[in-house]
Image (spheres, rainbow, N blue to C red):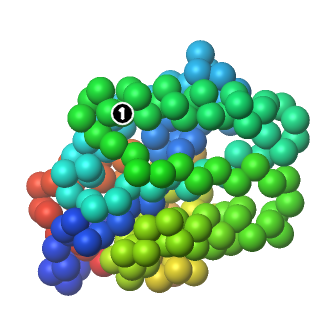
Amino acid sequence: MNNKNDGRTIDKTWTLFLDRDGVINKEIVGTYVTKMEEFEFCEGATDAIQTAAELFGRIIIVTNQRGVGRGIMTTGHLREIHNEMEAVIASAGGRIDRIYACTAVSDDDHNRKPNPGMALQAREDFPEIDFRKSIMVGNSLSDMEFGKRLGMHTVFVTTKLAAVALPHDLIDEQYPTLAAWASHLAAHLILEV
């Protein structure tokens, strides 16, 4: 599933960008996670983030949350979910440095993936972020396009869509889950492209 190793070692100068639904927590297809009772971590996700916390200088979540814009939930509900999610991740030895959530309904919104707004906000907040030393992990092609628009290395997890044939213009690596990718990364400590 992976291509040749170019020998670039992951270290604390690297940033990990993560999608949320389908990567960290199980995605509820056709609707939204509107409260913590509906939030269920993907198997191995907290351990994967703990592994990533040892390797990456920054871990950033970038998530489209159109349910807020549609009035299905409030920003307060979203904040509660994220606060509890972060607490569980921290108790497992991981960390999230910042969460950016686009609540806009329109696909044209600058912050809605695949548009780059959330990553540009992250770089404003953390000027040391270098997109060429960043990885985007997501489970949709819009996540992959988001990463590629910014020059990131992309990792596609197949929790929602079927695996695609590689090589692919938008996808550098693919794995069944975030946990599978983190296990591979920890074992090799290098970036495959």
Work out whether residue 100 or residue 157 is closer to the camera in this orientation and state it: 100
Residue 160 is situated, as x and y percent measured from the top left of the image, at 57, 45
Where is 116 relative to 65, above or below?
below
User: Which quadrant of the view contains residue 93?
Assistant: top left
Residue 59 is situated, as x and y percent measured from the top left of the image, at 38, 55
Residue 74 is situated, as x and y percent measured from the top left of the image, at 78, 32
Residue depicted at 47% across the width and 45% down the height: 23
Residue depicted at 43% across the width and 68% down the height: 126
Residue 190 is situated, as x and y percent measured from the top left of the image, at 17, 69
Mark 1: give few (<14), some (14-19) or many (20+) Cα within 10 Å. Answer: many
Q: Is residue 44 visible?
A: no
Q: Tell me the kind of residue under disc 1.
A: Ile
Find disc 1 in the rendering and name its residue.
Answer: 89
For the N terminus, the quadrant is bottom left
Work out whether residue 43 or residue 107 is closer to the camera in this orientation and state it: 107
Q: Is residue 71 visible?
A: yes
Residue depicted at 66% across the width and 34% down the height: 78
